[in-house]
Image (spheres, helix red, strand yellow):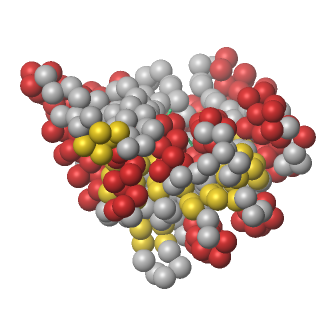
Amino acid sequence: MKKIQMVDLGSQYEKIKPAIDSAITEVITNANFINGQEVINFSEDLKDYLGVNNVIPCANGTDALQIAMMALDLRPGDEVITPSFTYIATTEVIALLGLTPIFVEVNKDTFCIDIEAIEQAITPKTRAIVPVHLYGQASDMNAIMAIARKHNLFVIEDNAQAIGSDYHLSDGTVVKTGTIGDIGCTSFFPSKNLGCYGDGGALFTNNDQLAKKIKMIANHGQSKKYYHDVVGCNSRLDTIQAAVLRIKLRQLDNYIDARREVADYYDSIFGPMKGVKIPFRSHDSRHVFHQYTLTLDGFDRDALSEFLAKKDIPSMIYYPIPAHRQKMFDSFGTASLNLPVTDWLTKRVISLPIHTEMQIEQLDLITKTVVEYLNN
Ligand SMILES: *Cc1c(COP(=O)(O)O)cnc(C)c1O
């Protein structure tokens, strides 16, 4: 049996090695490292896959979120509503731009932003909502878009963990997550569901005007060569990474299926167990299982993690400290916020290994070991 890892990118590479190697070699041979043809080709392919009007690649997922907020002209003092139970990048860029992060609760079942909490957090200064499709499950976008329309707010989807997920809109159409709000952002960090071999990211939008502005901001605010209209940044996807992503995009649906099979297996073992909550699956969306996260009630989560580690089984806590309690936000005084669900979850969640190359023997060992701990 192979060593169990949270993500096994080496084994995944073995299966696509010839295509990857020749694509990378071609980029090097052509020496088209920056804004090469593969960047254009990949953006077109991803546009078709997502069914969105515009895909603008950039350097990483954090940049994508920052550029999105810049493109929407959010200004210092503007309030941005976001869950505290997320990866720090979502919330960090809000503060970086001088905006005010308004941290709200997540739903205990879906781990995604709580709808009632959004409504309660809205003030005259609110400009945007940033839902995070955490662990690969979509936020309640139908409700979020209705609130945004009612209060005239922008919606930026943090889709870094849910690329490829289908979402059922209330009008009956099915669309991809990240294409519902004004702007969708994603990351191609190696371990993400669609990951490259370094850093990468992208923004999606159906609004062509907004797309032009995003492109300009990501390229030094440049409208034409050496004419800089707005303050921007330098955020590009390397051609080599685009070449890798183009090959992996063709596998994305297979990769999602593989992840879902792992989740089904885990569900079948843990579903019947008392005090163990398996991931909720919303009927509005197709969970793409970036993470498989259990919520343990009445067990010592950290002791389980140590028990697994002793048997060479990795596990992770996403995320042990919620954003509103990070020192980073001391000046906003958010640590004293009352977010009981968020605090409750940070003490009880544990994510088990899930990736595209899991072997049945590995799953068998992981589940048996978890069950052994829980039954003791
Ligand atoms: C990974 C991730 C990001 C940031 O992406 P990077 O490419 O690492 O900058 C942002 N938000 C969420 C929810 C993520 O999981």
Percent across and percent down for residue 322 are 75, 38
Of residues 57 and 74, which is closer to you in this image? 74
Of residues 261 and 17, which is closer to you in this image? 17
User: What count of labels does the image hold?
Assistant: 0
Q: Please determine whether, in this image, residue 130 is positioned above or below residue 345.
A: below
User: Which residue is the extreme one toward the bottom?
Assistant: 171
Percent across and percent down for residue 125 are 73, 58
Of residues 360 and 325, which is closer to you in this image? 325
Pick the quarter of the image with the N terminus: top left
Q: Residue at x 63, y 42 (%)?
A: 94
Q: Residue at x 62, y 35 (%)?
A: 96
Work out whether residue 13 can be spotted: yes
Pick the quarter of the image with the C terminus: top right
Q: In this view, does 180 lie to the left or right of 145?
A: left
Q: Residue at x 71, y 48 (%)?
A: 77
Q: Which residue is drawn at 69% across and 35% down?
A: 319
Quarter where residue 365 is shown:
top right
Quarter where residue 301 is shown:
top right
Q: In this view, does 41 lie to the left or right of 367?
A: left
Of residues 125 and 179, which is closer to you in this image? 125
Work out whether residue 325 can be spotted: no
Q: In this view, does 294 lie to the left or right of 177?
A: right
Percent across and percent down for residue 22 are 13, 27
Q: Please determine whether, in this image, residue 180 is positioned above or below residue 274.
A: below
